[in-house]
Amino acid sequence: MISNDIKQQFIRIVGAENYDDSQAGRLVYSYDATPQFQSLPDAVIAPRNTQEVAEIVKICNEHRIPIVPRGSGTNLCAGTCPIEGGIVLVFKHMNKILEIDEENLTVTVQPGVITLDLIKAVEEKGLFYPPDPSSMKISTIGGNINENSGGLRGLKYGVTRDYVMALEVVLPNGEIIRTGGKLAKDVAGYDLTRLFVGSEGTLGVITEATLKLIPMPETKKTMLALYQDLEAAARSVSKIIANKIIPATLEFLDQPTLEVVEAYAQIGLPTDVKAVLLIEQDGPQEIVERDIKKMAEICKSEQAVSVQLARSEEEAEALRTARRTALSALARLKPTTILEDATVPRSEIAKMVKAINEIAEKYNVKICTFGHAGDGNLHPTCPTDARDRDEMERVEKAFAEIFAKAIELGGTITGEHGVGAMKAPYLEWKLGEAGIAAMKAIKQALDPNNIMNPGKVFAKSTRKRVVVTR
Amino acid sequence: MTTEKERSIIQTKFRERMDEDELMNCMRCGFCLPTCPTYIESGFQESHSPRGRIALMKAVVDGLIEPDEDVERSLNMCLGCRACEPVCPSGVRYGHLLEEARDIIQQNKKHSFPIRVVRKLVFDELFPYPKRMRIATALLGFYQRSGLRSFARKTGLLKVLPPSLRDMEKILPDVPALKEMKERPRHLESEGAPKRRVAFFSGCLMDTMFMPTNDATMRLLQLAGCEIVIPESQTCCGALHGHGGEKQKAKELAKQNIRAFEELDVDYIVTNAGGCGAFLMEYDHLLKDEEEWRERAKAFVAKIKDISEVLVELDFHKKRLKVEPQVVTYQDSCHLRNVMKTSASPRKLLRAIQGVEFREMKDADRCCGSAGIYNIVEPEMSMQILDYKMEMAKQTKATTIVTANPGCLLQMKLGIEREGLSDRVRAVHIVDFLLEAAEGVQASEHEERIRKTS
Ligand SMILES: Cc1cc2nc3c(=O)[nH]c(=O)nc-3n(C[C@H](O)[C@H](O)[C@H](O)COP(=O)(O)OP(=O)(O)OC[C@H]3O[C@@H](n4cnc5c(N)ncnc54)[C@H](O)[C@@H]3O)c2cc1C
Ligand code: SF4
Ligand code: SF4
């Protein structure tokens, strides 16, 4: 609870119009894109600059008020659900692109900038910012950095982490620090920049970021490979990479996913095949053509029933856009949509696809799979109904087994969506007790009062481990 | 304002009537946020976004919150433009949720006396009756022609009205006389061999205040080769009622319209106002719980088509069409685009006109802020949205702004007035412009003939 006195202090900092503790105002910040998590904050505050953030954080630290920084609330791990109440910080005023530095190839932004707006702004100057999560038309850079988000171009270009050069952070004690710089090299002390990337708002509030840009690739080609066999599609993925080709994009969609995406997008996607791969290569023309040709051959040798090249950039863009709607489109099937983010080494992708199907069968649940196959990152998704207790139990068991299998194959419980509150009970499976202890020590050092996004990443108790036999 | 008792009734009704599956269908991905005008113009407030509104409705159903003033405020601020629907991959039918929620609130709260009187007058006593609509419009005509208007304008009498209504007064079209409104055609032959037999939905406002546009529509249909029937027993589409929380009345009007059209044996029922067309097109949803009407509503809905779709289907754009050289831009009617899914045909027709330099304006698909009576009840937000729209329109340097719905047309006129552009820019309904283009050709051909013979 926030006392009236503290409320007045907040209002003095941000102004009454930027402090909201009405019932409706709090409700609309009680959720994110994660199903089954909802909890009301005590207030929502919209600071206008770093100084205001620092002052708010100081008050919170003094009075032990939880802070949940929030971008657009599209995360899938209950990362912005205020499960312990407190205040939600929104960055609707801090949403400016501050500088595009064409000499150093960097862009400096405030955390509330929408990813797609940033991408468009730099592309106007012939520059390229590759991390493109499917949610980019609404996700914020602050959110992307804190989840270390990936995207369709991750295979060749890496994820958000690979583009963050410098940060301005308000620490939980209210101090403002700057990490990194516009530097190609910098070994002055610990790499705090990397520490804050993917920290899910648990270590501090990011108030500014400088991101790396690269030149726009000259050309790009897009193709679809169609399969009647799921595992054949997955094998193609491993084989393409084993053949030393790194395409820009290598996405996997199974038949049920294709059906719902086509139902929405209506662009003539094949729905009579078991799976497709969406493959793209960019770069100098000769190389693009050579790689595309070679990948088409590999797909065919792995029993692709057909390989189709997009005829125009519009057609290619339609395919990419359609792929980005996969998760939301799956949501039309059933009232509740539960999705996972298991990731394995690229060589193991076929085994993982096989295991997912077997597990679905074993627990008698429907699982649709799509994802960034080239990154070894799959999104097995279960359309279900939270009101059906019995099914929900089976779904949970199935996913626990999928996590266990992923780890067994040398993978992880989450590739890009983060731990949040949702996967916190499973984190120890991946890290082990000592790993958790090391991370907790960092958290304790920076945020001794545990005010930053409490209840996320670290669970009160760990889920009992599932042992996969086979 | 609602009392505690009203709130508790509203909450119970939410639980009973709101479609829970549809509410749960929203997975909160936020993909709809960047297209929502009120989210953008409110400075990115979740409570004024589709995702936020759905969450509020669901929270009332779940009993997490009470349907208090802020909840109502959030729902009132919604334009009902439904731009959030085509971009929702999950296919959430937001419009239906909104309509139901508004109806529950309206039906279960006691309005202040003056509002009650106005609502009753408008919803129950005026729009459903063509005759009364004609008389009301005629009164407006009397005001415009009798010298009363110039008196009111000169004396500053209009200042008693709030600014939003004062501006409205200026942009209302000069309306036809009562006699003209009474003598409407009921059947028209096609020009040349008939290619289609269609019925025309003439609407209430369209057949009075915008009568010349209705005439132009029928003329175009004739030119395109349509035989037209215009049943007399048709009535107002009920959109105003449906969107305004008077669902029961909307259902009555829907039934009357279905009865008026179902025996006609026509290929299409043609509309020329996106707002009406979209509402007609959802009669099946409106009447979904009424056994004996379900199939009849479906058959009715299957025939609804906007004039521009009919014209394109009949190759009207391949006719010779010509206007004076001018830059033209098109403002989508939200409901025409988002519900009737008509956006390419109007553009195709405009591009086909000789003399037209068509320039797409940025965010042409974003609502202009007219939204039924929104510009009267939420003037501040409406004008903010309109100002953005006019900025985009100005960037195209268009001298003609074309729209496809009477509300949008008035709003564009209002925008032109507010920007002080009325000497340079005009707003027209697409059918009026098309007729101008068709007649332009006839006129120039006529001139040519005279020149040749003399
Ligand atoms: C349909 C759909 C598709 C998606 N596709 C992808 C995808 O392809 N790849 C992918 O990686 N993810 C994907 N996501 C997940 C999600 O969109 C990303 O995690 C995204 O980066 C979240 O951005 P946001 O602005 O919504 O952040 P939020 O969800 O608001 O926040 C995310 C985290 O960042 C923290 N945070 C936000 N701003 C700050 C700040 N300024 N300082 C400190 N902490 C902060 C929050 O506390 C939270 O822990 C998808 C989600 C959806 C719904
Ligand atoms: S796009 Fe659809 S599913 Fe996503 S938040 Fe909006 S209404 Fe909900
Ligand atoms: S109908 Fe229009 S204003 Fe209302 S939520 Fe949808 S997009 Fe926003």
Image (cartoon, coloured by chain):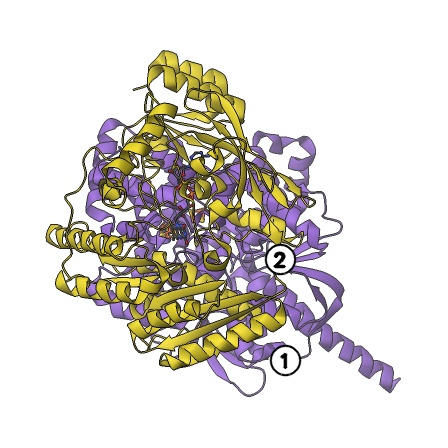
Chain colours: A yellow, B purple
Q: Residue at x 24, y 62 (%)?
A: A367
Q: Nearer the viewer, residue B271 or B317?
A: B317
Residue B259 appears at what percent x and percent y? 32, 68
Circle 1 — which element? helix
Distance from disc 1 to disc 2, alpha carbons, whole Å, reads 42 Å
Mark drawn on residue A256 = none
Task: Report which residue position mark 1 lands on.
Answer: B318
* Whether label 1 touches label 2, CB < 8 Å: no
For residue B61, what is the image quadrant?
A: top left
Tell me, yes or no, whether dots 1 and 2 are on the same chain.
no
Q: Residue at x 67, y 42 (%)?
A: A101
Image mark 1: chain: B
**Please, what is the three-letter code of the amino acid marked with disc 2?**
Met
In screen coordinates, is A44 left or right of B66? right
Residue B5 appears at what percent x and percent y? 22, 29
Q: Is residue A366 above or below residue A49?
A: below
Residue A175 appears at what percent x and percent y? 48, 20
Mark 1 or 2, closer to the camera: 2
Q: Is residue A241 above or below residue A464?
A: below
In screen coordinates, is A155 left or right of B107? right
Q: Residues within 10 Å of mark 1 (few under 14, many from 20)?
A: few
Circle 2 — which element? loop
Residue B172 appears at what percent x and percent y? 60, 48
Q: In the image as oriented, which residue stretches furthest toward the top?
A: A5
Tell me the quadrant of the picture where the N terminus of chain B can be found: top left
Mark drawn on residue A216 = 2
For residue B176, what is the image quadrant?
A: bottom right
